[in-house]
DNA sequence: CCCGTAGCCTACTGATGAGTAGGTACGGGA
DNA sequence: TCCCGTACCTACTCATCAGTAGGCTACGGG
């Protein structure tokens, strides 16, 4: 009980609206990530947030609105984290590398956010899944643009163009799946996980056979011990 | 209404138990795939199956049992389909190639099964997610074994061994994600989708730059026009 | 000191849906 | 013919929530 009370914000009175909204969203992300959309109850969210249920309805609206707000907030944070890692002036492989690292850093730091985004939102068929699918589509587009830029630096035929979007989808899926795997193996450092995926997508599995690997070029802003 | 009636089995009386069980499972897979576990109601399932609700409880048990039964049946079908395509005497790349093709064929033919397996089961935190995670783990192990065999054919160091499981997870995720993408782009032939993924995982994205591609060797049972 | 308003609550309603009680109908064996 | 078991149903109970009605309290400005 004392543990639970530590997890709840001390019941403070008369806080300004935006503070309460943040508390409610934090609680909602946590509860949604634990139970999923349908099993999460507004009562539990209000309890965890340390406010009463009508406050949620007053500030964030109905359950679907609340969920959509969670998705929007967390997805925006994720995309910003990734975008911050990717600088357009870099070579395609380094862009991908920094994007991957930023992604895994986010997942490692915000596990609950990640669960909500990946597990819950994708599965529910409701009106919010659009919210999430749109966000996922943005991620795919980001990767797609990267691939297209890589490809157009050389000659590129029609079929390759069509396939980049599919490849981007596959790549995003690989990242999601590997992130889940990583949650079950937290002892592996983030950089190592990122480099595995980087090698897979950039060099292919051929390196398992012939031993070639991709390594980041030191001059590109990686501090080297 | 006539359309709906066509989708429901004509209300036949006094069928043997195993027939009814199959009808119920078919209906359950359809309804679960459309609404997800929590939103799917036993009433709708019984309605679609053309039986009354107590029949479901008598034959398949409670809602969780029913869902687990769906997962088990569909997952077994999927694994069997993949295993049927992979023959152990082939080279690793050809094994992967045939496995991928069998996988995409299954997804194309059994869309509802796939939705239940991928979207619904993974997301619910309930007791059945274990059922599904176990099955997913089996798929990962299958791929992992393939990678290990590929790697041990050459010298292989410690870190590479650790990473194969992660790579397998990434690969399975890439397949899942690409399968979802394919559901939204059904005009692309199954073989083409499979070859995209095969190239990604075997050759890496490097081919976008230098244009090398993996092609199946004709002698391995692929009819070549 | 009074009033408006923003913050906040307890205690309800109403719908939905899981699960069941208790039956009827039909067929096969004694 | 009478049982008995299997197939099958209608019509409930009961718990769980989403969502709300209505009111109470503190603060700030006039």
Image: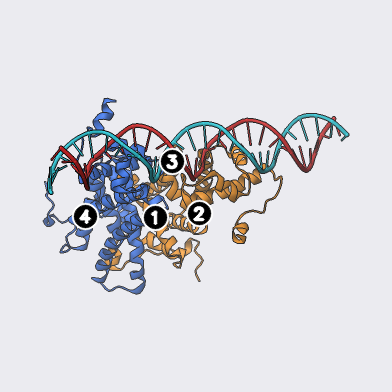
Chain colours: A orange, B blue, C cyan, D red
Q: Residues within 10 Å of mark 1 (few under 14, many from 20)?
A: few
Q: Do labels 4 and 3 share a chain?
A: no
Q: Is residue B2 above or below residue B90?
A: above
C-alpha gap between disc 4 and disc 3: 31 Å
Name the residue carrying label 4: B80
Q: In this view, does D12 lie to the left or right of B118?
A: right
Which mark is first along the chain, 1 or 4? Answer: 4
Asked whether disc 2 touches disc 1, contact meaning CB atoms under 8 Å apart, the reply is: no
Q: What element carries label 4?
A: helix
Mark 2 and mark 4 in contact? Answer it, CB < 8 Å.
Answer: no
Q: Distance between the residues labelled 2 and 3?
A: 18 Å
Residue holding disc 3: A129
Q: Name the residue under label 1.
A: B127
Vertical order, B173 against A62 (above or below): below
Residue neighbourhood size for the residue with mark 3, other residues' Cα within 10 Å, grouped as few (<14), some (14–19), many (≥20) = some
Q: Is mark 2 on a helix, strand or loop?
A: helix
* Residue B109 seen: no
């Amino acid at each position: 009980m004392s543990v639970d009370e530590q997890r709840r914000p001390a019941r403070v009175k008369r806080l300004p609206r935006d503070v309460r909204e943040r508390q409610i969203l934090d609680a909602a992300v946590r509860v949604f990530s634990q139970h999923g959309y349908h099993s999460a109850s507004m009562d539990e969210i209000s309890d965890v947030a340390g406010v009463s249920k009508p406050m949620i309805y007053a500030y964030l609206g109905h359950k679907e609105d609340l969920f959509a707000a969670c998705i929007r907030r967390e997805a925006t944070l994720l995309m910003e984290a990734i975008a911050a890692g990717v600088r357009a002036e870099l070579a395609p492989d380094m862009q991908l590398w920094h994007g991957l690292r930023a992604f895994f850093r986010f997942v490692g730091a915000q596990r609950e956010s990640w669960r909500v985004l990946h597990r819950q939102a994708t599965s529910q068929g409701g009106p919010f899944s659009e919210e999430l699918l749109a966000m996922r589509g943005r991620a795919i587009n980001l990767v797609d643009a990267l691939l297209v830029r890589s490809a157009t630096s050389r000659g590129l035929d029609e079929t390759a163009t069509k396939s980049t979007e599919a490849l981007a989808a596959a790549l995003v899926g690989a990242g999601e799946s590997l992130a889940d795997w990583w949650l079950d193996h937290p002892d592996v450092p983030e950089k190592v996980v990122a480099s595995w995926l980087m090698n897979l997508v950039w060099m292919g599995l051929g390196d398992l056979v012939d031993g070639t690997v991709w390594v980041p070029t030191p001059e590109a802003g990686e501090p080297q011990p």
